[in-house]
């Protein structure tokens, strides 16, 4: 962040931190196993503890909705690519990706989930 600010790139940079699965169980992770409480389950199963993960997005030019807002809707890892390409680059890549463009939901333009189908594993 300091380097981005020093080079004048901070305001136009999207910072994202996320994961693709929940933490490992104590048996799989040994002493480094995760505690996914209050969610049930761990990495490798379909319970919420194995599937739901936090994500962090910071974009100074993204407005208040992108900074300090909690979104409690399904956002699949595959949604990042079409969301960022559509939202930041203005290109419609929704047909060439398994993910969905969720830019309007992430930026607060629309409320509620974009995804209306059931996801199966």
Image (cartoon, rainbow, N blue to C red):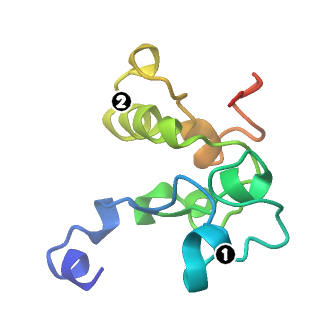
Q: Tell me what residue is drawn at x 81 percent, y 73 percent.
A: 37
Q: How many marks do you count on the picture?
A: 2
Q: Tell me what residue is drawn at x 37 percent, y 59 percent.
A: 14
Q: Quadrant of residue 66?
A: bottom right
The 10 Å Cα crowd at callout 1, few under 14, some 14 to 19, many 20 or more, is few
In percent of width and height, residue 107 lies at 58, 48
Q: Nearer the viewer, residue 65 or 22?
A: 22
Q: Quadrant of residue 90?
A: top left
Q: Which mark, by number, is residue 90?
A: 2
Q: Secondary structure at mark 1?
A: helix
In percent of width and height, residue 80 lies at 46, 42
**Quarter containing the C terminus:** top right
Q: Nearer the viewer, residue 103 or 53?
A: 53
**Quarter containing the N terminus:** bottom left
CA–CA distance in space, label 2 to label 1: 44 Å
Q: Are marks 2 and 1 in contact (CB under 8 Å)?
A: no
The 10 Å Cα crowd at callout 2, few under 14, some 14 to 19, many 20 or more, is few
Q: Tell me what residue is drawn at x 42 percent, y 59 percent.
A: 61
Pointer 2 or 1: first along the chain: 1
In the picture provided, is 105 more to the left or to the right than 79? right
Q: Is residue 15 above or below residue 110?
A: below
Looking at this rendering, what residue extends furthest in the left direction? 7
In the rendered image, which residue does mark 1 sit on?
Answer: 26
Q: Is residue 110 above or below residue 65?
A: above
In the picture provided, is 111 more to the left or to the right than 64? right
In percent of width and height, residue 7 lies at 14, 75
Q: Tell me what residue is drawn at x 78 percent, y 53 percent.
A: 48
Looking at this rendering, what residue extends furthest in the top direction? 95
Q: Secondary structure at mark 2?
A: loop
In percent of width and height, residue 33 lies at 62, 77
């Amino acid at each position: 962040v300091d380097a981005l600010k020093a080079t004048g790139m901070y305001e136009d940079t999207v910072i994202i931190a996320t994961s693709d699965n929940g933490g490992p169980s104590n048996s799989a992770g040994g002493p480094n196993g995760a505690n996914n409480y209050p969610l049930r389950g761990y990495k490798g199963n379909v319970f919420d503890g194995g599937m739901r993960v936090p994500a962090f997005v910071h974009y100074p030019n993204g407005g208040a909705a992108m900074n300090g807002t909690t979104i409690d809707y399904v956002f699949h890892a595959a949604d990042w690519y079409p969301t960022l390409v559509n939202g930041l680059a203005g290109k419609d890549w929704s047909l060439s990706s398994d993910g969905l463009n969720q830019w309007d939901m992430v930026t607060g333009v629309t409320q509620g989930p974009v995804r209306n189908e059931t996801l199966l594993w």
